[in-house]
Image (cartoon, rainbow, N blue to C red):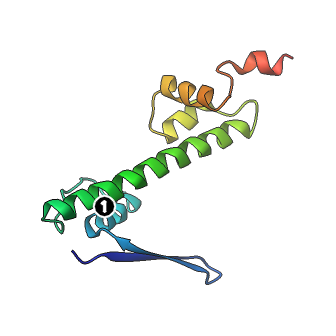
Amino acid sequence: MKKKFAEFGDADGTTETVFDIAPDLAVALIDALRNQVGVEPPRHARTFDDLTATIAQTSRLIQHLDTFRELAMIQADDTSPHADRKAIAIAAAMPPSRLYRVLEKHGRPRNRKTETEK
């Protein structure tokens, strides 16, 4: 299976290059970043070893992005004692109950009134 690479750049000309991306993961990542509707099954990986390598790399990416999303949610909540938690939950595509579990996991109070009244 021929691996892909990705290069990310900014307006200043700084670039970051990532090598050895499973081709099916590269396609899925591009589709997700472009907000494409519909997810296709792997087309490039055919053997058991190639498919499990794709699964493993996808799982590592998902775990990393889940943690990153949680940290971004905590930062968004920390921007103000009146940060809109409903908007945070909508942006994170999760119900409010799950948002509150994430916030509590990171030491943020469920009820901010008790924190601001002190």
Task: Give left or right: position of 116 versus 65.
Answer: right
Seen at 27% across and 60% down, the residue is 54
Seen at 72% across and 21% down, the residue is 112
Q: Secondary structure at mark 1?
A: helix
Task: Give left or right: position of 82 versus 57.
Answer: right
Where is residue 25? Give x, y as percent: 31, 63
Classify residue 6 by image quadrant. Answer: bottom left
Where is residue 64? Give x, y as percent: 48, 51
Q: Which residue is identified by label 1?
A: 28
Seen at 46% across and 28% down, the residue is 95
Task: Give left or right: position of 58 versus 17.
Answer: left
Q: From this view, report whether residue 21 is shown above or below residue 15.
A: above
Q: Quadrant of the image for the N terminus?
A: bottom left
Q: From this view, report whether residue 5 is shown above or below residue 116.
A: below
| Residue situated furthest bottom in the rendering | 13
Seen at 67% across and 36% down, the residue is 77
Where is residue 27? Give x, y as percent: 29, 66
Residue nearer the viewer, 21 or 35 = 21
Where is residue 63? Give x, y as percent: 44, 47
